[in-house]
Amino acid sequence: MSIPRSILFVTGNKHKLADVTSILGNEFEIKNHSYDLPEIQGSLQDIVTEKCRAAAEIVQGPVLTEDTWLSYDAMNGLPGPYIKWFLNSIGCDGLYHMLDGFPTKDAKAGCTFGYTEGPGKPIHMFDGILHGEVVSPRGDKGFGWNSIFQPNGHEKTYAEMDDDERNACSHRFLAAMKLRDFLQSQI
Ligand SMILES: O=P(O)(O)OP(=O)(O)OP(=O)(O)OC[C@H]1O[C@@H](n2cnc3c(O)ncnc32)[C@H](O)[C@@H]1O
Ligand SMILES: [Mg+2]
């Protein structure tokens, strides 16, 4: 395998694309095929494997895909990868109030990249996890559930950080560094 100079990121989410371009854009040309890949039920590995496999079939070549999750400690990891449907249904305020009465608001934000050289080739996964807390919504930057997630050691929620500040510490940054190291280690 040779080090790719450009990466085709299959995602329907323009904010994710902007984040990945901001984090890896100095080293790779990030191209996008905008497609909302199906997301099966199952473990995170199953979901990412299936997204990556489906994307490689669609483009018939090397692809990068990603799945993002938000896990509440008080709920044994839920909503996890199903966060999108919770967010669509009850919004950030509802996601915050889901924890009313629970003893802890600790949470983990994470994402897993899936990368493959093409259909039938191995799928390599790289995850990034950031521990933090679910707080009452603050801030209007960013996207998704950014306004309710405050990483440990920070005074701001993701939505109160500038993009550069968030992309220097985020779960996506941590996963992207592993992806970058893997790609650069290939000859
Ligand atoms: O096409 P794909 O890549 O699947 O993009 P998506 O928007 O469907 O993304 P996911 O399936 O991974 O669902 C994750 C949900 O979390 C949101 N989200 C993703 N990354 C986020 C981040 O870094 N901060 C806050 N919210 C995020 C996103 O808007 C979705 O509602
Ligand atoms: Mg999705």
Image (cartoon, grey):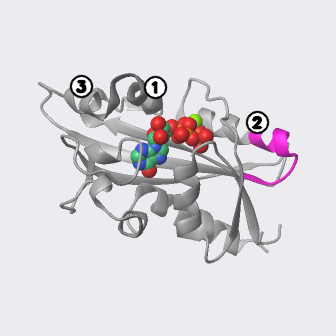
Instruction: Report the residue marked by disc 3.
Output: 98
Instruction: Report the residue marked by disc 1.
Output: 85
Query: Which image quarter has ligand 2?
Result: top right
Q: Toward which corner of the image does residue 158 lie, by quadrant? A: bottom left
Q: Residue at x 22, y 48 (%)?
A: 138
Residue 156 is situated, as x and y percent measured from the top left of the image, at: 22, 59
Circle 3 SS class: loop
Side of 135 where 126 appears, left or right: right
Whether residue 156 is in magenta: the answer is no
Q: Residue at x 54, y 48 (%)?
A: 112
Which quadrant of the figure contains the N terminus? bottom right
Residue type (three-letter) at the residue carrying disc 1? Trp
For mark 1, does the 10 Å Cα neighbourhood hold few (<14), some (14 to 19), or many (20 or more) residues? few
Instruction: Report the residue marked by disc 2.
Output: 54
Is residue 12 visible to us here?
Answer: yes
Label 1 or label 2, whichever lies nearer to me, is 1
Lower position in the chain sequence, tag 1 or tag 2: 2
* Gap between marks 1 and 3 measured at Cα: 14 Å
Residue 45 is situated, as x and y percent measured from the top left of the image, at: 58, 38
Front residue (pair 182, 136): 136
Front residue (pair 58, 119): 58
